[in-house]
Image: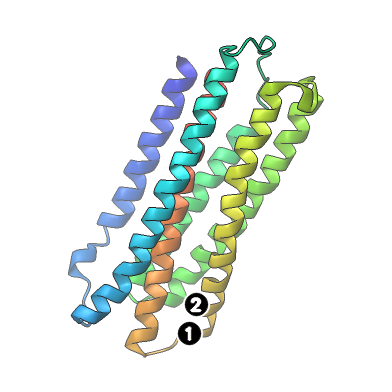
Amino acid sequence: MMTAMVIAMLTAITVWWLLIQRLKDKPWMTQGVVPTSQEGLTSSAPKVALWAFLIVVASLFGIFASAYTLRMQGHGGLATWQPLQEPSVLWINTLVLVFASGAMQIARNRIDQDNIAGGRGYFFGAGLLTLVFLAGQVLAWQQAQANGNLGPSNPAFAFFVLLTAVHGLHMLGGLLVLGRTTVRLWRNAGTTNVVSRSKLRLSVELCTTYWHWLLLVWLGLFALLLST
């Protein structure tokens, strides 16, 4: 119960902080070119595609979580569940991912204000922190096995690797897009072309949304692992 409360508090604080970072820059007062109807449709299509993808993947994680719970409860007459001793490094990894998501939000806020030079460092930093998070997840696998969790023969360990690996693969996919966007931010920092700057802002916005979603998914997975 205490662990679930800690995760809930961490989630609430994270969402509150990200919301404050977004609102304090007063995006509704940002001046710029009013988009035409065609430009609005063009910018909306990637957002709709991203949210459709996130919904599908969220359903996938929901299926994994249901299978995890059923297996833990011993449905199907399978062997008794042996609880996993979660590595302590997971707490550090979680904090690193919170910082990565926060850096992404700061980058978005500055780039939304046409301060590309001021935001690209935070954007790049978010990518580095994500790499640190992934390295920490690999370390967590090693620590879990060293803690006497019996490796793949233990269903709890197998599910732990599955859940963290699938989450990590989605982060790696996001890093590919983040890398391309980072290169564009460095190459086009001084551009005055309205269309180019609009595309940069859209790319950063999509990456930010994806990172916030990955953070929330991880907080849910972490809470599930700790509660069992």
- For the point 37% across and 67% down, which residue is it? 46
Q: Quadrant of residue 47?
A: bottom left
State which quarter of the image contains the N terminus. top left
In this view, 51 is above or below 205: above
Secondary structure under tag 2 reads: helix
Q: Whole-percent x and y of residue 172?
A: 61, 56
Q: Tell whether label 2 touches label 1 (CB within 8 Å).
A: yes
Alpha-carbon span between mark 1 and mark 2: 5 Å
In this view, 57 is above or below 157: below
> What kind of colouring is applied to the model shown?
rainbow
Q: Whole-percent x and y of residue 203?
A: 43, 70
Left or right: 215, with 93 as reference point = left
Three-letter amino acid code at disc 1?
Asn
- For the point 31% across and 72% down, which residue is it? 43
In this view, 61 is above or below 54: above
Three-letter amino acid code at disc 2?
Leu
Q: Which residue is mark 2?
A: 185
Q: Which residue is mark 1?
A: 188
- For the point 67% across and 41% down, which residue is it? 137
Is residue 150 or residue 63 the one in the foreground? 63
Q: Quadrant of residue 194?
A: bottom left
Is there any visible trace of residue 17 in the rendered image?
yes
Q: Whole-percent x and y of residue 89?
A: 66, 33
Q: Whole-percent x and y of residue 57?
A: 47, 46
Is there any visible trace of residue 105 in the rendered image?
no
State which quarter of the image contains the C terminus. top right
- For the point 57% across and 13% down, which residue is it? 75
